[in-house]
Amino acid sequence: LAKTTQPISMDSYEGQEVNITCSHNNIATNDYITWYQQFPSQGPRFIIQGYKTKVTNEVASLFIPADRKSSTLSLPRVSLSDTAVYYCLVGDATGRRALTFGSGTRLQVQP
Amino acid sequence: NAGVMQNPRHLVRRRGQEARLRCSPMKGHSHVYWYRQLPEEGLKFMVYLQKENIIDESGMPKERFSAEFPKEGPSILRIQQVVRGDSAAYFCASSPNRGGVKNIQYFGAGTRLSVL
């Protein structure tokens, strides 16, 4: 399974853009990169998924360089409600392998 | 379309008792995953099931833990003879497909098990 490395914690202020980078040096050809968000006492929630280049949805953008050994989750103009733990996962989209959660990045947004 | 439903939300058991955790996947989803989360830690995969089949149980302890996903009814994670170390949040997730793009998992709110 591809191991991921991401910062333990990050601090930001409301209205700023937050970029969280995840390293996955041994990503496999079939692996997709997926980010989840988890609030206290809740289950993780899917944010975004990508394979290469850039993916954007109404919540975030995901940047993946050509070598795919890292990815960056970009949250535009964060608010207090974006305070959560963000997990980067690398997994086989065919479903033959379970996804592995690391320790995640704890984002604290301050006023 | 209701989300993944887990019950109970909180479960208190004494050492040696059995804990049964239930998970109803989203409508149309035939794949269920169970994870365990200790405080301040990430989720640890336990088991992956498809209807009536265990696909991957590599993360589940060999003793006292079992899981099933019958043809009818919810998926059940069963912990026999619970010990204090079993205290954790247990999350269930479901996904609509095994193959193809976007094996996205949708999570329930979890069951918090406390062993006294």
Image: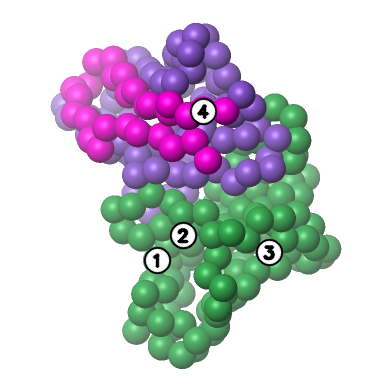
Mark 1 vs mark 4, foreground winner is: 4
**Total residue callouts:** 4
In the rendered structure, which amino acid carries the disc numbered 3?
Ser
In the displayed orientation, state which residue is furthest to the bottom.
B16
The answer to if A101 sits in the magenta stretch is no
Residue A4 — which label? none
- Which tint is chain B? green
- Whether callout 1 and callout 4 share a subunit is answered no
Residue, disc 2: B36
Residue B74: horizontal and vertical position, in percent?
A: 71, 64
Residue, disc 3: B75
Callout 2 secondary element: strand
Q: Kindly indicate whether the residue at mark 1 contacts the one at mark 3 (C-beta within 8 angstroms).
A: no
In the rendered structure, which amino acid carries the disc numbered 2?
Arg
Classed neighbour count for the residue bearing mark 3: other residues with Cα under 10 Å, few (<14), some (14–19), many (≥20): many
Q: CA distance from mark 1 to mark 4?
A: 30 Å
